[in-house]
Image: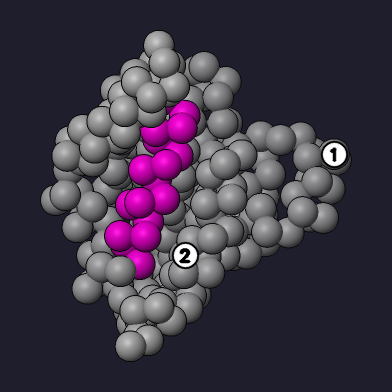
């Protein structure tokens, strides 16, 4: 495959995946998050790897553009690495959420390629965090790939990014995750402020 044909194939895959997204589910996520914010709840955004970078960026946008009190555990690398070193990876998010006093008024938003699976031993720290959220009655939302994993099973609403090519599950899922959460912070149900470039003539 030539570089040009690969580029065209990747872009066409991306366009097809965007068309395949369920806009009604995205609206459900936006409206659910708005209810949490308007009810005085907080938003905790969870992700690992590239999704951790998305979580950090999204925290900024939800706070600045949506007036939503939002946090992610991966922004505090000192606490994160201390927890991994002392207690192991699997409880890093759930123990952080306990200290943050996750409660029924709050919500989790998960960004993940697979959504987590205890059976497959994949992203078990996400699974434990989701189970904690269920136990306290917090709302759960997700933007995930593949079959949605544990996130899809337990979420109030979950956007599942379909698989177009097994060779590109991660880049396509993570790329479209960014598209979706930028959509969310621009959504009329959530948006409270315009970005600098949108408000500059």
* Mark 2 neighbour class, 10 Å CA radius: few under 14, some 14 to 19, many 20 or more: many
The image position of residue 113, as x and y in percent, is: 45, 33
* Res 151 seen here: no
Q: Which residue is mark 2?
A: 43
* Mark 1 neighbour class, 10 Å CA radius: few under 14, some 14 to 19, many 20 or more: few
Foreground residue among 74 and 18: 18
The residue at 34%/20% (across/down) is 5
Q: CA distance from mark 1 to mark 2?
A: 26 Å
Taking 58 as reference, is 178 above or below it? above
**Magenta span contains residue 25:** no
Say which quarter of the image contains residue 28.
Answer: bottom left
Magenta span of residues? 169-185
The residue at 27%/56% (across/down) is 29
The image position of residue 184, as x and y in percent, is: 31, 62
Q: Which residue is mark 1?
A: 85
The secondary element bearing badge 1 is classed as helix
The secondary element bearing badge 2 is classed as strand
């Amino acid at each position: 495959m030539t570089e040009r044909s690969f580029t065209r194939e990747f872009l066409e895959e991306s366009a097809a995946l965007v068309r395949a997204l369920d806009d009604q589910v995205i609206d459900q996520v936006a409206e659910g998050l708005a209810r949490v914010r308007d009810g005085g709840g907080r938003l905790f955004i969870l992700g690992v790897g590239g999704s951790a970078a998305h979580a950090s960026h999204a925290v900024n946008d939800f706070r600045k553009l949506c007036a939503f009190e939002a946090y992610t555990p991966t922004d505090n690398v000192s606490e994160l690495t201390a927890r991994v070193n002392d207690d192991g990876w699997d409880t890093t998010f759930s123990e952080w959420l306990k200290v943050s006093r996750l409660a029924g008024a709050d919500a989790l938003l998960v960004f993940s390629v697979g959504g987590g699976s205890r059976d497959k031993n994949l992203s078990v720290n996400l699974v434990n965090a989701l189970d904690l959220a269920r136990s306290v009655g917090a709302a759960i939302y997700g933007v995930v790939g593949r079959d949605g994993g544990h996130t899809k099973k337990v979420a109030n609403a979950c956007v599942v990014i379909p698989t177009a090519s097994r060779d590109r599950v991660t880049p396509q899922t993570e790329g479209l995750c960014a598209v979706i959460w930028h959509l969310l912070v621009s959504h009329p149900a959530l948006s409270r402020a315009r970005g600098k470039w949108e408000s500059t003539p």
